[in-house]
Amino acid sequence: MHAPTGSVDAGAGLRRPAIDFRDASVRFGDFTAMGPVNLTVERGEFLVIVGPSGCGKSTLLNLVAGTLQPFTGETIFNGAPVEGLNPAVGYITQKNYCLPWLTVEGNVRLPLEFRRFPKAQVASLAASALERVGLRGFEKAYPRQLSGGMLQRVMIARTLVYEPDIYLMDEPFGSLDALLRTKMHDEILHLWKDTDATFVFVTHDLAEAVTLADRVVVMSGRPGQVKLTLDIDLPRPRDVVDIQSNPRFGGYIKTLWEALDLN
Ligand SMILES: Nc1ncnc2c1ncn2[C@@H]1O[C@H](COP(=O)(O)OP(=O)(O)OP(=O)(O)O)[C@@H](O)[C@H]1O
């Protein structure tokens, strides 16, 4: 489903951004949960969002997925407003949404079967997705037989298998231990490098944000608005351990911490 990176808007001669939030706000009843937000996400960008609990980070992702509609403004995705569920989105959270009665392979095949891919293609794409996340040999295992990290890899395989234009990741590694999380950072950076897709990643972990991001957005308290956007000018490809000793790493964390202003 990837549009080629570097694709050109024939009319304007401009590259279209992946997402453009224009004065987007969300209400639940009388209560404004988020916004208004104005934010552009470039194609192929790795954008990380941080902000206090309840400020509307997941809500922002839900606008892109089309599971919510804005109360004011609009969400433009690949040049058109999001109306209804957005099939070009891959959504990964920390929850395990594997179907327990299906094998690992059965879970990874699901999105392709929903999309009515030809049978032969389903088998080969599922095999290659499982290979990419290091789960070859576990095709016939059931979710209950897997560790937390392996389950998270199944969720990633189940997403990358249909090549979404955009990965929405809502604290995907929040439930993993620190060592495994570091390993997953390495894997996610490889995945990002190997695709043309855009990544929007929500976290509460500032080191995770700086390790992964091209740009970090700090949201204010509820109703969350964009308080700061910070370019992370650290070299790529990144070694997820070595990068932490880069002299700029700590400075970025301090800037983000001060912008969060949680006191
Ligand atoms: N379906 C809903 N109905 C009513 N209120 C909601 C609904 N979904 C979210 N909210 C409220 O909207 C606000 C923003 O929620 P959201 O989950 O987007 O925040 P968040 O920044 O992702 O939070 P956290 O960091 O704790 O995950 C919260 O106050 C939440 O309680």
Image (spheres, rainbow, N blue to C red):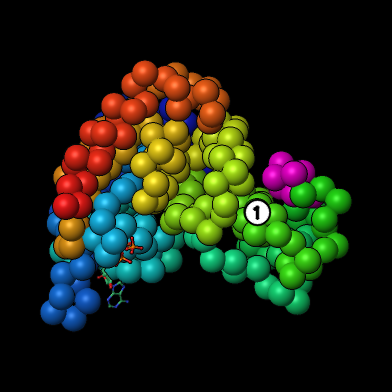
Q: Quadrant of ligand 1?
A: bottom left
Describe residue 121's horizontal placement relative to residue 30 as left or right: right
Q: Is residue 113 above or below residue 229?
A: below
Q: Main secondary structure of the magenta part?
A: helix
| Image-quadrant location for residue 123 | bottom right
Q: Position of residue 20 (x, y in %)?
A: 27, 46
Q: Residue at x 85, y 62 (%)?
A: 140
Indicate the quadrant where residue 239 lies: top right
Q: Which residue is mark 1?
A: 149
Residue at image point 47% right, 47% down: 166
168 lies above or below 240: below
Residue beneath the point at 17% across and 62% down: 223
In the image, what residue type sits under mark 1? Gly
Tell me residue 253's x, y (percent). Answer: 31, 34
Query: Which of the 4 image quarters holds residue 171?
Result: bottom left
129 in the magenta segment: yes
Residue at the far bottom in the pictured view: 29
- Looking at the image, residue 85 sits to the left or right of residue 254; the answer is right
Q: Relative to residue 257, is residue 235 drawn left or right?
A: right
Please provide percent x and percent y for residue 128: 76, 45
Magenta residues? 127-134
Q: Is residue 24 left or right of residue 95?
A: left
